[in-house]
Amino acid sequence: MPLSFGAELRARRLTAGISLTRLAKSINYSKSHISKIENGTKAPGMLLARLCDVALEADGELASIVTTAQTPRLSRPPGKSEVDDLWVMQLEPGGSGRFGMARRPGNAEPLHRTTWPPASNGAQQRYTDEVLGEFRGQFDSLRRLTQSLPSAAMLPLLIAGTHAMRLAAATAPAAIQARLFLLASRYAELTGWMAQEAGDDDGAVWWTDLAVEYAAAGGDRRLAAFAGVRRADIAMYQHNGPRTVELARHVQRLDCGSRIRGLAAQREAQGHAIDGDDDACRRALDRAATWLGEPDDTSAGPVLGSSTVSDPINMATGWCLHDLGRPDQAAERLVGQLERTPAWAARTRGRLGARYALALLAAGDIDRGCAALDQALNDCAGLNSATIRTDLREAAHQLNRHPTNQTARTTLPRLTNALTP
């Protein structure tokens, strides 16, 4: 019969000639905490298992004993009934539409305040290169705004923008139609990202699939591969390592260009890190670095993936090192990337900062970890990001391990408030 985690941990510790005190100090847990785990009176967490794997050179065997449940999502409170202020807008494919006020949600037909006719009677619209440039500039502005505004503010803008692009593409001259469909695909893809940030994973997939349709209409078949990267990203934030790896590997076998392959390899590495597979993680990071370092065709429109991370491989390496039980090394990587992220990219800074704080806390540096956490909370304040909350929840768990630490006690209430949707 295989040994329990506690028994296996004790056996490996004694074989290595390491005292309970020495092990506890090396992984920044209390001696009593480790003792309770070895005696079977306390369940181990995956982070502790990974730290012990590294300290005892167990090659991931301790972590393999621990089974972790999928990270629970925060439940959403039921929506309030807006008596006189529910806005309803209908957008028809042909361009007609209407906006109205509903007395009660789900009640009778809204009271219409504004209506508009179809975009045209079949005649092609006067879309020019100059107009297309304005559309592209609007997209770039909206993309930048996603860094500082919550999904509640961005989703209505992006949904309306996607509709405007699909309408423009449907009524534009043939010479410019493909380019408008490509831009419509980027609007839809960005809408999918904001849906994911809002905690709506199903909505994120739907919008990404719509982006694939628009891209195909514009002659770009590669966005279908990027949809696989998006699905892998969702699986990663759900801490589903095997699914992340499966989806990411499939994308890398497709003819989709070096950038998309590189992003997929990066996701694969993060999936391996969740599973505790150090060697496979590093191999995937090497592939990602090779592909992302190659020139790629950017004629299809705005760049796919993050445009605010200056060194995606270094960032992903730091991200992975934390999951692999090497928080000190993770912190060194992440802080450098955080320092190079511009101040206006609040969403990216919040995400990197939360991960950096998590690494410091796991390394036992509570004071610096809390300082980093405070800065991350400042950066992502008001964004209500579902993906950032994934690491903030883990940070709260880490702080709860230090009830007598004054810095932790000061930071925890603010962190708890940030986790309230």
Image (cartoon, rainbow, N blue to C red):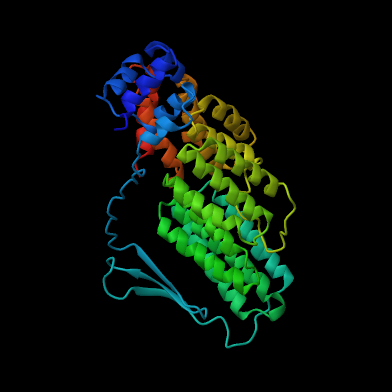
Q: Who is closer to the viewer here, 92 or 102?
A: 92
Residue lying at the far front of the rendered structure: 1
Q: Who is closer to the viewer here, 258 or 385?
A: 258
Q: Quadrant of the N terminus?
A: top left
Residue lying at the far left of the rendered structure: 41
Q: Is residue 182 above or below residue 271?
A: below
Q: How many numbered discs?
A: 0
Q: Is residue 385 visible?
A: no
Spot occupied by residue 75 in the image (x, y as percentages of width and height): 30, 48
Q: Is residue 344 above or below residue 49?
A: below
Spot occupied by residue 393 in the image (x, y as percentages of width and height): 38, 36
Q: Who is closer to the viewer here, 222 or 12?
A: 12
Determine the residue positioned at 43% across, 75% down.
98
Determine the residue positioned at 47% across, 77% down.
92
Spot occupied by residue 336 in the image (x, y as percentages of width and height): 63, 31
Spot occupied by residue 124 in the image (x, y as percentages of width and height): 65, 83
Q: Is residue 389 above or below residue 54?
A: below
Determine the residue positioned at 54% across, 63% down.
188
Q: Is residue 195 visible?
A: yes
